[in-house]
Image (cartoon, grey):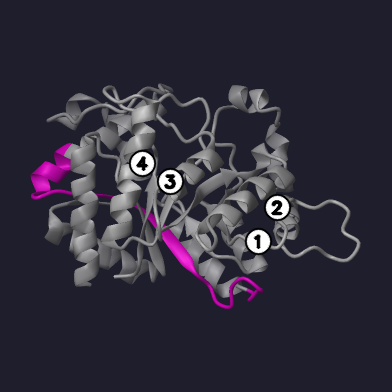
Amino acid sequence: MPPLSILDLVRVTEETDAGGALANALDLARRAEDWGYTRFWVAEHHNMPGVASAATAVVVGHVAAGTRRIRVGAGGVMLPNHAPLVIAEQFGTLARLFPGRIDLGLGRAPGTDPLTLRALRRGPEASEEFPRDVRELQAYLAPAAPGQRIRAIPAQGTEVPLWILGSSLFGAMLAAEYGLPYAFASHFAPQALLRALAVYRERFRPSAQLDRPHAMVGVNVVVAETDAAARRLWTTQQMSFTNLIRGERGLSRPPIDRIDDYWTPDERMQVTGMLARSVVGGPETVRRGLAELVRETRADELIVVSDVYDHAARLRSFELLATLMREG
């Protein structure tokens, strides 16, 4: 099995407020470090009551300060929402505080709705500048060029590793052209997964950061002692996606016995498609499912989302998964 990393949604539940969600994220990161996970990433989302990672750089610092070895980063920062100079300053500062441990994944989507996008003082057209913004960000993180008048202090020269995140061929082509590692968001948009990976590998150009393609695949994983127990825990994420389709942005809900009592047939079809790249079950079921995913995608790394409501059950899911990782 390739290396495993974690994408934590820092979920606020009906029983845990934002402070509790941030504390749980740090608790998970500390344990993940001991269990052998490679990275712990959080993502930028705005105006979502159930997600506490809007101030992504702050959350990265919170987690990095409470851990020792595990790489910590953004999976990702939605670069069109920000000036590249500001992101360079933030993540360059993190790199000075936690040398060799900070990653910066970059997305092109806004990570929010159009009304909130206006509140961020950004328009939909900002995404068109994404390739240029990535280059500008790289320049701020690189050693200063002769005569360079604008510098990101103290970020200059930190060369924080950049990743391109995506769910379409656009991100795959950009990551390949720029010679950057690529993470595909198949945990919520799996349709273009295989084609995007093929394009990325076919078109990859070596860069100063990376000499060969490195593809990370996002996957939802829930592990419990039995298949039935895992499927029940899984209903929390199924309800969350159903609510997104309904336009409802609420808190994470506790699992239920019958998911078919919650969604309509049309909602079930949509959610099942969005969550098609998910592996849910007892240890042996998950072992087989992940082996098949790796065989099909040739992933260099997997990044796992486990949106389990109860914190103890979520820890257990990641602990069981780490055992499978160690067993190979």
Mark 4 vs mark 3: which is more N-terminal? Answer: 4
Do the residues under discs 4 and 2 have CB atoms within 8 angstroms? no
**Residue to which mark 1 is pinned:** 158
**Residue to which mark 2 is pinned:** 154
Q: Tell whether position 221 is magenta.
A: yes
> Which residue does the image show at 22% across and 72% down from the upper left?
328
Mark 1 vs mark 4: which is more N-terminal? Answer: 4
Mark 3 vs mark 1: which is more N-terminal? Answer: 3
Residue 317 percent across, percent down from the top left:
21, 49
> Which residue does the image show at 53% across and 61% down from the upper left?
182
**Residue to which mark 4 is pinned:** 25
Between circles 4 and 2, the one closer to the viewer is 2
Label 4 neighbour load within 10 Å: few <14, some 14-19, many 20+: many
Highlighted magenta segment, given as a residue range: 205-232
Do the residues under discs 2 and 1 have CB atoms within 8 angstroms? yes
The amino acid type, in three-letter code, at marker 4 is Ala
Above or below for 281 versus 259 = below
